[in-house]
Image: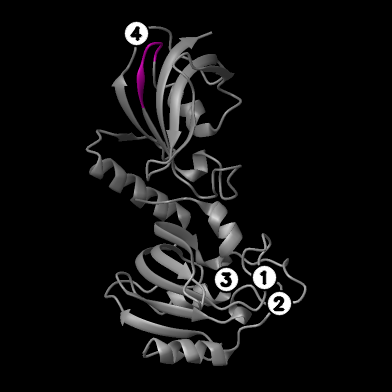
């Protein structure tokens, strides 16, 4: 299951510059004490990152600009867990330095522990929300599940896996949109500029619903929505229904919008109620 809760990353993983004016710094001595108390066989890199490899993995090793899928548990030196996720998609080019370096020590299928000094995390100022204080060491138990050279490859691979896992009879258009027609419908077929009324449920590949209409649907112009909808709704006639699997290039792009993160695949159950 892939989770696209990028709000978490903006809080915990991405570079920030706000926080406590007088943080209490955790030092290398604190990391070494933790390693000793927990009997870890840790190695130090030139940057100051400490790591433990439980299993190196056997497949591809990611580069610093790859898109990766990971499971992780993240906590502080006192053992307080501040987050835990499965099958999260990360862009290594924009996460904190310690995570970028540490993930590259693994191959696909590998797992280990990263002990990240504050200099490779959120520095002396902490993160923007104040939930991670300046000078804080971060620990990640992490497993690298997959790596991809770009979001296009990640989206396509993930969509195909979703189709297989859910036994869908899906068709791909030239744009990269995948669709399933449950019922083609018998009424009018819309054009790219039609005003339509559609009932829908929108969710991510992990099943998390981000938006949903009621059964009466909502009305809008097909020239005023994301291109995956402009193309996808036109595949149905009035009364028709099915599923749209929309890659980020036909959705909200690399930057995302609101609760929808950049690079996210969107799935919509849709019913075309009327062409107005």
Q: Earlier in the sequence, mark 1 or mark 2?
A: 2
Image marks 1 and 2: residues in contact by CB distance under 8 Å:
yes
Which element is circle 1 on? loop
Total of numbered circles in the picture? 4
The residue identified by callout 4 is: 186
Label 1 crowding class (10 Å Cα cut-off): few <14, some 14-19, many 20+?
A: many
Q: Earlier in the sequence, mark 3 or mark 4?
A: 3
The residue identified by callout 2 is: 23
Disc sitting over residue 78 in the figure: none
Q: Nearer the viewer, mark 1 or mark 2?
A: 2
The residue identified by callout 3 is: 96
Left or right relative to 59: residue 230: right
Residues at marks 4 and 2, CA–CA distance in whole angstroms: 66 Å
Q: Earlier in the sequence, mark 3 or mark 1?
A: 3
Q: Quadrant of residue 183?
A: top left
Q: Earlier in the sequence, mark 4 or mark 2?
A: 2
What residue is at 48 percent from the left and 81 percent from the top? 115
Q: Nearer the viewer, mark 3 or mark 4?
A: 3
Residues at marks 2 and 3, CA–CA distance in whole angstroms: 19 Å
Left or right relative to 249: residue 17: right
- Residue 84 position in % (x across, y down): 43, 61
């Amino acid at each position: 299951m892939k989770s696209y809760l990028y709000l978490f990353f903006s809080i915990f993983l991405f570079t920030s510059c706000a926080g406590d004016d007088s943080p209490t710094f955790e030092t290398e001595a604190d990391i070494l004490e933790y390693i000793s108390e927990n009997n870890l066989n840790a190695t130090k890199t030139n940057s100051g990152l400490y790591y433990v490899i439980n299993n190196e993995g056997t497949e591809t090793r990611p580069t610093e600009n790859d898109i990766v899928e990971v499971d992780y548990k993240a906590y502080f030196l006192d053992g307080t867990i501040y987050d835990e996720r499965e099958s999260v998609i990360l862009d290594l080019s924009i996460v904190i330095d310690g995570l970028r370096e540490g993930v590259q020590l693994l191959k696909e299928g590998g797992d280990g522990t990263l002990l990240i000094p504050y200099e490779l995390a959120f520095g002396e100022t902490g993160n923007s929300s104040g939930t991670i204080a300046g000078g804080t060491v971060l620990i990640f138990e992490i497993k690298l599940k997959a790596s991809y050279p770009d979001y296009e490859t990640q989206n396509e691979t993930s969509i195909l896996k979703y189709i297989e896992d859910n036994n869908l009879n899906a068709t791909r258009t030239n744009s990269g949109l995948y669709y399933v027609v449950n019922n083609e419908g018998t009424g009018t077929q819309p054009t790219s500029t039609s005003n339509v009324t559609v009932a829908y449920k929108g969710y991510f590949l992990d099943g998390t619903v981000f938006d949903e209409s009621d059964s009466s649907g909502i009305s809008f112009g097909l020239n005023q929505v994301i291109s995956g909808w402009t193309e996808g709704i036109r595949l149905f006639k009035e009364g028709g229904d099915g599923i749209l699997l929309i890659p980020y290039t036909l959705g909200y792009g690399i930057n995302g919008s609101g609760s929808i993160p950049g690079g996210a695949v969107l799935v919509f159950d849709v019913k075309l109620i009327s062409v107005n």
